[in-house]
Image: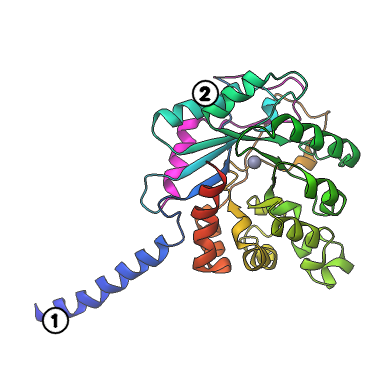
Amino acid sequence: MAVTTRLMKPRAHIEASAISWKGKFLLPPGAFDTHVHVFDPTIGPYAADRAYTPDDAPLHRLIEFNKSISRDGTGSGIVLVQPSPYGTDCTVMMKCLRELRARQKSVYAIAMIELESITDRELERMHELGVRGIQLNFQADGKGLDVSRLLDTLQKAADRICHLRGWMIQLFVPGWAWNTLFDVVSKLPVPIIADHLGGMQGAPKLLSHVAKDGVLSQMGFISLLTLAKLSKVIVKISGLYRASDRTTACFDDTREIIEAFAKEIPDQCIWGSDWPHTGEGKDRTKQRSLSTMEPFRVIDNRALLENLRKWVGSEVWGKMMRENPARIFQ
Ligand SMILES: [Zn+2]
């Protein structure tokens, strides 16, 4: 009996410490997942001119996922992002926003709007319900980026929303675009959320001569950092699979980029899971049938969070998960 007790004690001790260490990789209380989508054709139709038809991702599955990555199992704050297949019809997103708010969730949203036709009253109504910005979607179809059209739209969008407290413009553009956008963004009256690492790419995805000089030398990187230091840009650490093909290695070629963000702009980083992890835009062509549902990627979010926590360290982790989004989304 005495022997059994001696054997049990150290084992129990090891298990307890392993659990608490593992728990550190999950979202702490007060954290925010700032990039998730709901795809539910039963509560709202997709746009006729969409680039793809996603698989289903209803709200109850989002809630389950959100609980599964939070340390205490109750879920984190959430930012819903209007996904491109719904175009500018935000019915589904707004319904989910209302439903989550009714459950006392800390939840906000980034909408897509028809800049020319939306009224001030409609924008104010969106604000009251928790919308804090709009997304300009310039490459969901995987085609090239029309920079002059983007610059023009950016200015118009900023003028349209700048009177709304706390509103931002979310952009997913290739990393090089920050050089071209620099002057306009540095003068915009609203901050920009640079989605998915600001479009920066891991070394294997870069041209060999760029990769040889290091990933931090890729075009646009310094511009992005500078804009963030000027508080003009917030970088969203999300969608690492858009920057890296190294799925089984947990996208470790993005490490240097993320470490640089953590070191240089710790107060301007936020995190988003990008659940349910939509596929790759480059495969989307007009020839492809919209009746075929595009499957989601299979992502090990727990492993991904574990890596991120190790890469950025505990202090920046707290800022990125909790303090920064709590300051930015109010
Ligand atoms: Zn997304």
Residue 141 in the image: x percent, y percent? 79, 36
Which residue has dot 1 on it?
3
Which residue has dot 2 on it?
95
Dot 1 or dot 2: first in sequence order is: 1
| Circle 2 SS class | helix
Label 2 lies in ligand 1 vicinity (Cβ under 8 Å) = no
| Crowdedness near tag 1: few (<14), some (14–19) or many (≥20) residues, C-alpha within 10 Å | few
Residue type at the position of mark 1: Val
| Residue placed most toward the observer, 69 or 299 | 69
Q: Residue at x 52, y 61 (%)?
A: 317
Inspect the magenta stretch and tell me whether residue 44 lies in it: yes
Q: Residue at x 68, y 62 (%)?
A: 254
Inspect the magenta stretch and tell me whether residue 60 lies in it: yes
Q: Residue at x 76, y 60 (%)?
A: 226
109 over 259 or under it: above or below? above
111 over 264 or under it: above or below? above
Residue 57 in the image: x percent, y percent? 55, 33
Task: Choose top left, top right, bottom left or bottom right for residue 46.
Answer: top right
Residue 245 in the image: x percent, y percent? 71, 56
Q: Is residue 65 left or right of residue 38?
A: left
Residue type at the position of mark 2: Lys
Task: Choose top left, top right, bottom left or bottom right for residue 44.
Answer: top right
The answer to whether residue 201 shows anywhere in this view is: no
| Circle 1 SS class | helix
Which quadrant does ligand 1 occupy? Answer: top right
Q: What segment is highlighted magenta in the picture?
A: 43-70
Q: Alpha-carbon distance for marks 1 and 2?
A: 60 Å
Residue 168 in the image: x percent, y percent? 66, 40
Which is more foreground, mark 1 or mark 2?
A: 2
Quarter that holds the N terminus: bottom left
